[in-house]
Amino acid sequence: MNPCGPSVVIDSNVWISGLLTKEGAPAQLTRQVVRRGQPVLTLETFEELKQRLWKPKFDRYVSMEDRKQLLHDLDALAFWVEVTKTFPAQAFCRDPEDDKFIHAALAAGADWLVTGDKDLLVLSENLLSAGVRIISPADALQLPEFTPRL
C-alpha cells in the first residue's frame, strides 16, 4: 500500500457504471478509491475512458458537464504511470484491448485492478504470481481498505 492508500487501476466500465448509477457497487467503489486510495491511470487507459464517455448513447443518462468533471478530477488526482515498452509486448487477455489495464497495474505495482469485465476477471488466478490482483467492484468493497467507516 502506498502512503496515499492503495493504488487501484479501475477499468473504464467501472468508472462509467459508477457515473451512471450513483448507488451501485461501481459508484461506491470509485468514491472509496478517490477518498481512501489512489486511482492509477496511463495515457492509454485515460484515452479509452474519454472515448467511451463521449459516446452518444450516454447523452440521455449523463450530462456533458458531469463527464467533463469526471475526466478533469481524474486527471488531477490520479497516479499517472508510464507503461514501458516491454509491457505492450506481453499479451494476457483474450481481448487485446484489455491488456492495457494489466500493463497499467504492472507498471504501477498497483494493489488491485478493479473490473467488471469477465475477460479480465477470469485471469485473476493466473496473474497473481505477476503481482496483479484482479477483483470485481463488489468484492473490492469487502476489502478492509474500502469498508465504510462508522
Image (cartoon, helix red, strand yellow):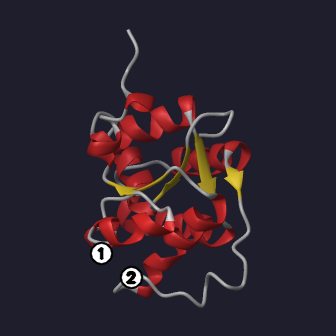
77 or 54: nearer the eye?
Answer: 77
Amino acid at circle 1 = Asp
Q: Return the residue at label 2.
A: 93
* Label 1: few (<14), some (14–19) or many (≥20) C-alpha neighbours in 10 Å: some
Q: Secondary structure at mark 2?
A: loop
Residue at the image point whose x is 35% and y is 45% from the top: 26
Residue 63, horizontal then vertical, whole percent: 47, 48
Single out the residue that lies furthest toward the top: 150
* Label 2: few (<14), some (14–19) or many (≥20) C-alpha neighbours in 10 Å: some
Q: Secondary structure at mark 1?
A: helix
Residue 54, horizontal then vertical, whole percent: 51, 65
Q: Which of the numbered marks, if any, corresponds to residue 26?
A: none
Q: Is residue 143 above or below residue 65?
A: above
Q: Which comes sooner in the sequence, label 2 or label 1?
A: 2
Q: Is residue 150 above or below residue 14?
A: above
Residue at the image point whose x is 62% and y is 73% from the top: 44
Amino acid at circle 2 = Cys
| Cα–Cα gap, marks 2 and 1 | 7 Å
Q: Return the residue at label 1.
A: 119
